[in-house]
Amino acid sequence: MNSGNHRVFLLKDVHLDVQPGEFISIMGPSGSGKSTLLHTIGLLDDFNEGEYFFMDQPVHQLKPRQIAELGKKHIGFVFQAYHLIDELTVQENIETPLIYHNVKTSERKALVADMLDRFGIVGKKDLFPSQLSGGQQQLVGIARALITKPGLLLADEPTGNLNSRQGEEIMELFSELNKEGTTIIQVTHSEKNASFGTRIIELLDGMITPPAPVKM
């Protein structure tokens, strides 16, 4: 990005290779570029320099419509602020991505029913987000992110607004999803949450810091 006559790099010299089935935790102080990196991986943010290959597709060479289609097909996003649609019920919020994927009504209803059951929120299906606790809203957000069965799940501080018990339930759910084959990348300040991952990446001033040497 440009700031006056100066170019400001939010991320710099970031080299990252993510293998299918990994569970990566991104950590670092506020302002280190964690969310920017996650949003770039998730095809939500553009970038000015460098190369990015996603599913062997050269993102840096694709048109905006192609990038949007790639993200819609393969990526689910869990936000700290939930980003549920206030005017829609729990059931309708979870169903929304399927509508964008042109899934038939009968199949949509079956998939949503499965998600409601899996997340234990069948009794909440006709409620609106404002009628749910923070933990319940996050469950709805995760269910919505997973309804299209994405290969990659990105989570930005997924337990930031939850109490410790709710947060641990979410992390155990992520661990279960990862064991089922979902690749997960999460941004977190919590060392406990980070420990659920198979790899931790530390960011500082927009750069990945090398891992600390192992003491013998």
Image (cartoon, rainbow, N blue to C red):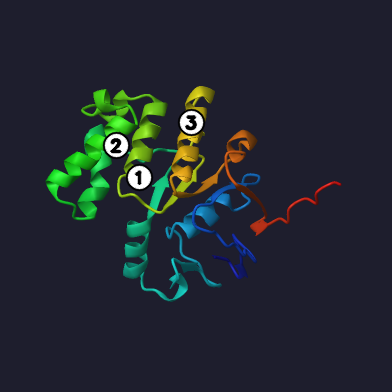
**What's the amino acid at mark 1?**
Leu
Classify 10 Å Cα crowding around label 3: few (below 14), some (14-19), many (20 and above). Answer: some
- Label placed on residue 161: 3
Q: Quadrant of the N terminus?
A: bottom right
- Label placed on residue 146: 1
| Residue occupying image coordinates x 53% and y 72% | 51
**What's the amino acid at mark 2?**
Met
> Would you name the residue on which mark 2 appears?
115
- Say whether residue 118 is visible: yes
Residue 16 x, y percent position in the rendering: 59, 62
Q: Please, is residue 26 above or below residue 51 in the view?
A: above
Do the residues under discs 1 and 2 have CB atoms within 8 angstroms? yes
Report the side of 211 relative to 104 (left or right). right
Residue 27 x, y percent position in the rendering: 62, 46
Q: Please, is residue 55 above or below residue 126 in the view?
A: below
| Residue occupying image coordinates x 44% and y 49% | 182
Rendered image quadrant of residue 134: top left
**What's the amino acid at mark 3?**
Asn
| Residue occupying image coordinates x 65% and y 44% | 29
Residue 72 x, y percent position in the rendering: 33, 57
Do the residues under discs 3 and 2 have CB atoms within 8 angstroms? no
Classify 10 Å Cα crowding around label 2: few (below 14), some (14-19), many (20 and above). Answer: many
Classify 10 Å Cα crowding around label 1: few (below 14), some (14-19), many (20 and above). Answer: many
